[in-house]
Image (tube, grey):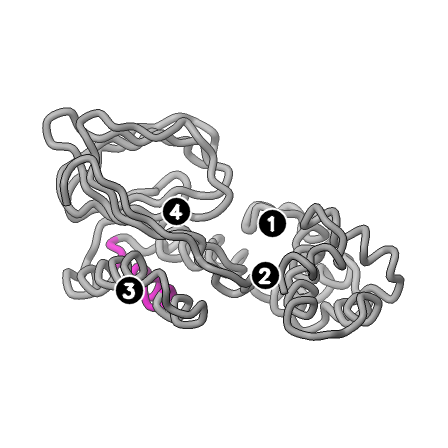
Protein backbone atom coordinates (compact mmCIF):
# COMPACT_ATOMS: atom_id res chain seq x y z
CA UNK A 1 0.00 0.00 0.00
CA UNK A 2 1.87 3.16 -1.13
CA UNK A 3 2.19 6.20 1.13
CA UNK A 4 0.05 8.19 1.61
CA UNK A 5 -2.94 6.01 0.77
CA UNK A 6 -6.28 5.86 2.52
CA UNK A 7 -9.11 3.37 2.19
CA UNK A 8 -12.24 3.44 4.29
CA UNK A 9 -15.94 2.74 4.15
CA UNK A 10 -18.99 3.67 6.18
CA UNK A 11 -21.72 1.42 7.49
CA UNK A 12 -24.36 1.29 4.75
CA UNK A 13 -27.67 1.63 6.57
CA UNK A 14 -29.85 1.08 9.59
CA UNK A 15 -29.63 1.96 13.27
CA UNK A 16 -28.84 -0.71 15.82
CA UNK A 17 -28.83 -0.17 19.58
CA UNK A 18 -26.65 -2.88 21.13
CA UNK A 19 -23.70 -2.43 18.75
CA UNK A 20 -23.49 -0.08 15.80
CA UNK A 21 -20.47 0.22 13.47
CA UNK A 22 -20.02 3.59 11.76
CA UNK A 23 -16.88 3.36 9.67
CA UNK A 24 -13.75 1.29 9.21
CA UNK A 25 -10.58 1.61 7.21
CA UNK A 26 -6.83 1.50 6.89
CA UNK A 27 -4.25 4.22 6.26
CA UNK A 28 -0.54 4.46 5.52
CA UNK A 29 0.51 7.89 6.78
CA UNK A 30 3.18 10.24 5.52
CA UNK A 31 5.75 11.55 8.05
CA UNK A 32 4.12 14.06 10.37
CA UNK A 33 0.60 13.38 9.06
CA UNK A 34 -1.80 14.65 11.75
CA UNK A 35 -5.50 14.53 12.55
CA UNK A 36 -7.08 16.93 15.03
CA UNK A 37 -7.59 18.47 17.42
CA UNK A 38 -11.07 17.04 17.14
CA UNK A 39 -13.93 15.44 19.03
CA UNK A 40 -15.61 12.22 17.96
CA UNK A 41 -19.25 11.31 18.46
CA UNK A 42 -18.50 7.60 18.94
CA UNK A 43 -15.75 5.23 20.04
CA UNK A 44 -12.85 5.01 17.59
CA UNK A 45 -10.17 2.33 17.90
CA UNK A 46 -6.88 2.41 15.98
CA UNK A 47 -4.49 -0.54 15.78
CA UNK A 48 -0.91 0.18 14.69
CA UNK A 49 0.19 -2.26 11.97
CA UNK A 50 3.68 -0.74 11.63
CA UNK A 51 5.58 2.40 12.49
CA UNK A 52 4.84 4.70 15.39
CA UNK A 53 3.30 8.03 16.32
CA UNK A 54 1.99 10.27 19.06
CA UNK A 55 -1.51 10.49 20.58
CA UNK A 56 -2.42 13.70 22.43
CA UNK A 57 -5.72 13.46 24.27
CA UNK A 58 -7.55 14.63 27.37
CA UNK A 59 -7.92 12.25 30.31
CA UNK A 60 -10.97 11.78 32.54
CA UNK A 61 -10.20 15.07 34.32
CA UNK A 62 -9.77 17.06 31.10
CA UNK A 63 -5.96 17.17 31.45
CA UNK A 64 -3.96 16.92 28.21
CA UNK A 65 -1.67 13.89 28.00
CA UNK A 66 0.77 12.50 25.42
CA UNK A 67 1.13 8.81 24.54
CA UNK A 68 3.82 7.41 22.25
CA UNK A 69 2.42 4.35 20.50
CA UNK A 70 4.04 1.87 18.13
CA UNK A 71 3.64 -1.31 16.14
CA UNK A 72 1.47 -3.95 17.81
CA UNK A 73 -0.26 -1.40 20.07
CA UNK A 74 -3.41 0.65 19.62
CA UNK A 75 -5.39 3.53 21.06
CA UNK A 76 -9.03 4.18 21.83
CA UNK A 77 -10.74 7.54 21.39
CA UNK A 78 -13.83 8.13 23.52
CA UNK A 79 -16.89 10.18 22.51
CA UNK A 80 -16.46 13.94 23.12
CA UNK A 81 -12.79 13.50 24.03
CA UNK A 82 -10.49 16.12 22.49
CA UNK A 83 -7.57 14.44 20.74
CA UNK A 84 -4.87 14.83 18.10
CA UNK A 85 -2.69 12.07 16.67
CA UNK A 86 0.46 12.51 14.61
CA UNK A 87 2.60 10.09 12.60
CA UNK A 88 6.29 9.90 13.50
CA UNK A 89 8.67 11.88 11.25
CA UNK A 90 11.15 9.01 10.82
CA UNK A 91 8.90 5.94 11.05
CA UNK A 92 5.30 7.00 10.29
CA UNK A 93 2.61 4.59 11.26
CA UNK A 94 0.20 2.51 9.26
CA UNK A 95 -3.00 1.73 11.11
CA UNK A 96 -6.42 0.19 10.72
CA UNK A 97 -9.46 1.50 12.58
CA UNK A 98 -13.07 0.83 13.50
CA UNK A 99 -15.58 3.43 14.71
CA UNK A 100 -18.46 1.97 16.74
CA UNK A 101 -20.92 2.54 19.58
CA UNK A 102 -23.63 0.79 21.58
CA UNK A 103 -25.50 0.82 24.87
CA UNK A 104 -23.04 -1.43 26.73
CA UNK A 105 -19.85 -0.52 24.91
CA UNK A 106 -18.50 2.03 27.40
CA UNK A 107 -19.09 -0.29 30.35
CA UNK A 108 -17.44 -3.23 28.57
CA UNK A 109 -14.41 -1.16 27.56
CA UNK A 110 -13.92 0.34 31.01
CA UNK A 111 -14.28 -3.08 32.64
CA UNK A 112 -11.42 -4.19 30.37
CA UNK A 113 -9.36 -1.21 31.54
CA UNK A 114 -9.72 1.08 28.51
CA UNK A 115 -10.77 4.52 29.76
CA UNK A 116 -10.20 8.17 28.78
CA UNK A 117 -7.31 8.16 31.27
CA UNK A 118 -5.94 4.83 29.98
CA UNK A 119 -6.54 4.80 26.20
CA UNK A 120 -3.55 2.72 25.05
CA UNK A 121 -4.19 -0.87 23.93
CA UNK A 122 -1.56 -3.49 24.66
CA UNK A 123 -2.35 -7.14 24.09
CA UNK A 124 -1.82 -9.99 26.50
CA UNK A 125 -2.55 -12.62 23.82
CA UNK A 126 -0.88 -12.50 20.42
CA UNK A 127 -3.45 -15.01 19.10
CA UNK A 128 -6.47 -12.94 20.15
CA UNK A 129 -4.78 -9.77 18.89
CA UNK A 130 -4.20 -11.37 15.49
CA UNK A 131 -7.86 -12.40 15.31
CA UNK A 132 -8.93 -8.88 16.23
CA UNK A 133 -6.79 -7.41 13.44
CA UNK A 134 -8.17 -9.95 10.96
CA UNK A 135 -11.69 -8.79 11.79
CA UNK A 136 -10.71 -5.13 11.39
CA UNK A 137 -9.21 -5.84 7.98
CA UNK A 138 -12.23 -7.89 7.01
CA UNK A 139 -14.58 -5.00 7.81
CA UNK A 140 -12.47 -2.55 5.80
CA UNK A 141 -12.35 -4.80 2.73
CA UNK A 142 -15.95 -6.08 2.67
CA UNK A 143 -17.90 -2.86 2.45
CA UNK A 144 -20.53 -4.40 0.16
CA UNK A 145 -21.59 -7.08 2.65
CA UNK A 146 -25.04 -6.90 4.25
CA UNK A 147 -25.51 -4.77 7.40
CA UNK A 148 -26.12 -7.77 9.65
CA UNK A 149 -23.03 -9.49 8.26
CA UNK A 150 -20.90 -6.45 9.08
CA UNK A 151 -22.43 -6.14 12.55
CA UNK A 152 -21.58 -9.80 13.19
CA UNK A 153 -17.93 -9.17 12.38
CA UNK A 154 -17.98 -6.02 14.52
CA UNK A 155 -19.09 -8.18 17.45
CA UNK A 156 -16.15 -10.51 16.78
CA UNK A 157 -13.75 -7.56 16.62
CA UNK A 158 -15.02 -6.22 19.95
CA UNK A 159 -14.88 -9.66 21.58
CA UNK A 160 -11.24 -10.16 20.57
CA UNK A 161 -10.38 -6.61 21.62
CA UNK A 162 -11.83 -7.05 25.10
CA UNK A 163 -10.39 -10.52 25.66
CA UNK A 164 -6.91 -9.61 24.46
CA UNK A 165 -6.42 -6.42 26.45
CA UNK A 166 -3.42 -6.43 28.78
CA UNK A 167 -4.69 -4.61 31.87
CA UNK A 168 -8.24 -5.45 32.95
CA UNK A 169 -9.75 -3.14 35.53
CA UNK A 170 -10.10 -4.43 39.06
CA UNK A 171 -11.85 -1.51 40.73
CA UNK A 172 -14.76 -2.73 42.90
CA UNK A 173 -16.48 0.68 42.92
CA UNK A 174 -16.44 0.82 39.14
CA UNK A 175 -17.87 -2.69 38.93
CA UNK A 176 -20.65 -1.77 41.36
CA UNK A 177 -21.56 1.32 39.36
CA UNK A 178 -21.48 -0.79 36.21
CA UNK A 179 -24.01 -3.12 37.82
CA UNK A 180 -26.37 -0.20 38.47
CA UNK A 181 -26.02 1.01 34.89
CA UNK A 182 -26.72 -2.45 33.47
CA UNK A 183 -29.81 -2.72 35.66
CA UNK A 184 -31.03 0.66 34.43
CA UNK A 185 -30.38 -0.10 30.77
CA UNK A 186 -32.10 -3.49 31.04
CA UNK A 187 -35.10 -1.76 32.63
CA UNK A 188 -35.24 0.76 29.77
CA UNK A 189 -35.04 -1.99 27.14
CA UNK A 190 -37.84 -3.95 28.79
CA UNK A 191 -40.15 -1.04 29.63
CA UNK A 192 -39.51 1.69 27.02
CA UNK A 193 -42.99 1.10 25.56
CA UNK A 194 -44.60 2.02 28.90
CA UNK A 195 -45.06 5.42 30.49
CA UNK A 196 -41.88 5.21 32.59
CA UNK A 197 -40.00 8.11 34.16
CA UNK A 198 -36.47 8.70 35.38
CA UNK A 199 -37.77 8.11 38.92
CA UNK A 200 -38.96 4.65 37.83
CA UNK A 201 -35.54 3.86 36.34
CA UNK A 202 -33.71 5.06 39.46
CA UNK A 203 -36.08 3.06 41.66
CA UNK A 204 -35.25 -0.17 39.84
CA UNK A 205 -31.58 0.30 40.81
CA UNK A 206 -32.31 1.19 44.43
CA UNK A 207 -30.61 4.59 44.11
CA UNK A 208 -32.08 8.03 44.67
CA UNK A 209 -32.72 10.02 41.52
CA UNK A 210 -30.01 12.65 42.02
CA UNK A 211 -27.18 10.18 42.66
CA UNK A 212 -28.43 7.82 39.98
CA UNK A 213 -28.43 10.63 37.42
CA UNK A 214 -24.79 11.48 38.18
CA UNK A 215 -23.66 7.84 38.00
CA UNK A 216 -25.60 7.19 34.80
CA UNK A 217 -24.29 10.25 32.97
CA UNK A 218 -20.71 9.52 34.04
CA UNK A 219 -21.01 6.00 32.61
CA UNK A 220 -22.94 6.66 29.40
CA UNK A 221 -22.29 10.32 28.62
CA UNK A 222 -26.03 11.07 28.60
CA UNK A 223 -28.61 11.89 31.24
CA UNK A 224 -31.15 9.12 31.98
CA UNK A 225 -33.90 11.18 30.31
CA UNK A 226 -31.83 11.78 27.17
CA UNK A 227 -30.83 8.13 27.03
CA UNK A 228 -34.44 6.98 27.35
CA UNK A 229 -35.53 9.34 24.57
CA UNK A 230 -32.64 8.21 22.36
CA UNK A 231 -33.51 4.55 22.86
CA UNK A 232 -37.19 5.15 22.11
CA UNK A 233 -36.35 7.15 18.99
CA UNK A 234 -34.00 4.42 17.71
CA UNK A 235 -36.82 1.91 18.08
CA UNK A 236 -39.22 4.33 16.39
CA UNK A 237 -36.87 4.74 13.43
CA UNK A 238 -36.78 0.94 13.01
CA UNK A 239 -40.58 0.80 12.97
CA UNK A 240 -40.83 3.70 10.52
CA UNK A 241 -38.39 2.01 8.16
CA UNK A 242 -39.52 -1.60 8.45
CA UNK A 243 -43.31 -1.29 8.86
CA UNK A 244 -46.22 0.65 7.39
CA UNK A 245 -47.63 1.62 10.79
CA UNK A 246 -49.09 5.13 10.95
CA UNK A 247 -46.94 7.68 12.78
CA UNK A 248 -49.35 7.76 15.72
CA UNK A 249 -49.13 3.99 16.13
CA UNK A 250 -45.34 4.13 15.99
CA UNK A 251 -45.37 6.76 18.74
CA UNK A 252 -47.61 4.66 20.95
CA UNK A 253 -45.40 1.63 20.35
CA UNK A 254 -42.41 3.47 21.85
CA UNK A 255 -44.16 5.05 24.82
CA UNK A 256 -45.74 8.21 23.39
CA UNK A 257 -49.56 8.08 23.49
CA UNK A 258 -49.63 11.70 22.27
CA UNK A 259 -48.58 11.91 18.60
CA UNK A 260 -47.58 15.58 18.88
CA UNK A 261 -45.21 14.81 21.77
CA UNK A 262 -43.75 11.92 19.81
CA UNK A 263 -43.20 14.04 16.69
CA UNK A 264 -41.46 16.74 18.73
CA UNK A 265 -39.17 14.21 20.42
CA UNK A 266 -38.36 12.54 17.10
CA UNK A 267 -37.53 15.82 15.40
CA UNK A 268 -35.42 16.84 18.37
CA UNK A 269 -33.37 13.67 17.90
CA UNK A 270 -33.15 13.35 14.10
CA UNK A 271 -33.78 16.92 12.96
CA UNK A 272 -36.77 15.99 10.78
CA UNK A 273 -40.34 14.87 11.38
CA UNK A 274 -41.18 11.13 11.49
CA UNK A 275 -42.94 11.36 8.11
CA UNK A 276 -40.01 13.10 6.45
CA UNK A 277 -37.57 10.61 7.98
CA UNK A 278 -39.66 7.73 6.62
CA UNK A 279 -39.68 9.26 3.12
CA UNK A 280 -35.92 9.64 3.20
CA UNK A 281 -35.16 6.17 4.54
CA UNK A 282 -37.54 3.74 2.85
Position of 90 compared to 33: left or right?
left
- Cα–Cα span, label 3 and label 1: 28 Å
Which quadrant of the view contains residue 182?
Answer: bottom right
| Relative height, residue 106 to residue 41 (above, below) | below
How many C-alpha atoms fall within 10 Å of the one at disc 3: few (<14), some, or many (≥20)?
Answer: many
**Residue at label 3?**
160
Q: In what quadrant of the picture does the C terminus appear?
A: bottom right
**Residue at label 4?**
44
Q: What is the x, y in percent for residue 246?
A: 80, 70
**Residue at label 2?**
180
- Cα–Cα span, label 1 and label 2: 8 Å
Indicate yes or no whether the magenta region holds residue 159.
Answer: yes
Residue 215 - label: 1
Residue name at image x 36 percent, y 56 percent? 112
The stretch of residues the image draws in magenta is: 154-166
Q: Are marks 3 and 2 in contact (CB under 8 Å)?
A: no
Residue name at image x 79 percent, y 65 percent? 196
How many C-alpha atoms fall within 10 Å of the one at disc 2: few (<14), some, or many (≥20)?
Answer: some
Position of 156 compared to 100: left or right?
left
The local secondary structure at tag 2 comes to helix
Q: Are marks 2 and 4 in contact (CB under 8 Å)?
A: no
**Earlier residue among tags 1 and 4:** 4
**Earlier residue among tags 1 and 2:** 2
Amino acid sequence: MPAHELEFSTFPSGHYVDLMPYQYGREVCEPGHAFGPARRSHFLFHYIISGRGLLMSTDGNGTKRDYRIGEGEGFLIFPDQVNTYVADLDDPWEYTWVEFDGIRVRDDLETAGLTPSSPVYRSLSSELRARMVDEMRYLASNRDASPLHLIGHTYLFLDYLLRSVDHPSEQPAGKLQGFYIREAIDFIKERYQDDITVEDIARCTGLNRSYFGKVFKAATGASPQRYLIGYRMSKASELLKLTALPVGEVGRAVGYPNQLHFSRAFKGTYGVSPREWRRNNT
